[in-house]
Amino acid sequence: MTLNLDIVRKNVIDCTKCELSKTRTNSVPGKGNFHSDVIFVGEAPGRNEDLKGEPFVGVAGKKLSLALEEAGISRDDVYITNTVKCRPPNNRVPSKHEKETCQEYIEKEIEIIKPKIICVLGNTAFGSILGGTEITKFRGKVGKKDGQLYFITIHPAATIYNQGLIETLKEDIKKLFELIRELKNGKDIPIDIEFSA
Ligand code: URA
Ligand code: SF4
């Protein structure tokens, strides 16, 4: 189990499959607890992540940590990753080609960790993973695609310039861990939206 994720990690670090490899400082593999019940998925690394080679270590990451702490969860308890593992220049949105090329890594992370639920952070991840748009309409909701459960919430970076949104993020993350508790107790949770595979 651990060995496989180590291989994915190494492959991400060495990857040159798309043009983002030319401008990155470091690739940013997923990080955290391999036995986590949940995988958090952001868009792509930003400047701090690119410099450190770790996901969500900048200001957006602090917001995510804050919301997790409020729910009584430590970052070390969960697994955090991105749809695209290298920083797009000037933090532009990753292209369709970059997302498609990088997709195999997140698929492997999911296959190995087998999370009870995947938490989609913000519009880009929502679009890449579930084909969704309009995160503000879907946030706080549970989705299902191909037998896998998803929880949809806003991107932590959205809370930086809109203080009110930090309460939204905290509320959603609390709900997420309540749902995880139910799942661990063997209960079914209500599905708000079915996404086609
Ligand atoms: N924003 C993201 O989407 N991912 C990170 O890792 C950091 C900021
Ligand atoms: Fe490879 Fe993904 Fe980085 Fe592109 S973004 S070089 S596919 S790891």
Image (cartoon, rainbow, N blue to C red):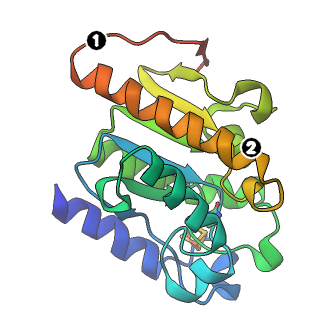
Helix, strand or loop at disc 2? helix
Answer with left or right where residue 95 lies relative to residue 186. right
Residue 26, image x, y percentages: 54, 85
Quadrant hosting ligand 1: bottom right
Residue at image x 52%, y 58%?
66
Helix, strand or loop at disc 1? loop
Q: Is disc 2 surrounded by few (<14), some (14 to 19) or many (20+) residues within 10 Å?
A: many
- N-terminal of the pair, mark 1 or mark 2, is 2
Residue at image x 71%, y 26%?
138
Q: Is residue 133 visible?
A: no
Disc sitting over residue 187 in the figure:
1
Is residue 121 placed above or below 87 in the rendered structure?
above
Answer with left or right where residue 110 lies relative to residue 113. right
Residue 93, image x, y percentages: 80, 61
Q: Amino acid at mark 1?
A: Lys
Residue 85, image x, y percentages: 56, 67
Q: Please give the residue where the numbered disc 2 appears in the rendered image.
A: 123
Q: Is disc 1 surrounded by few (<14), some (14 to 19) or many (20+) residues within 10 Å?
A: few
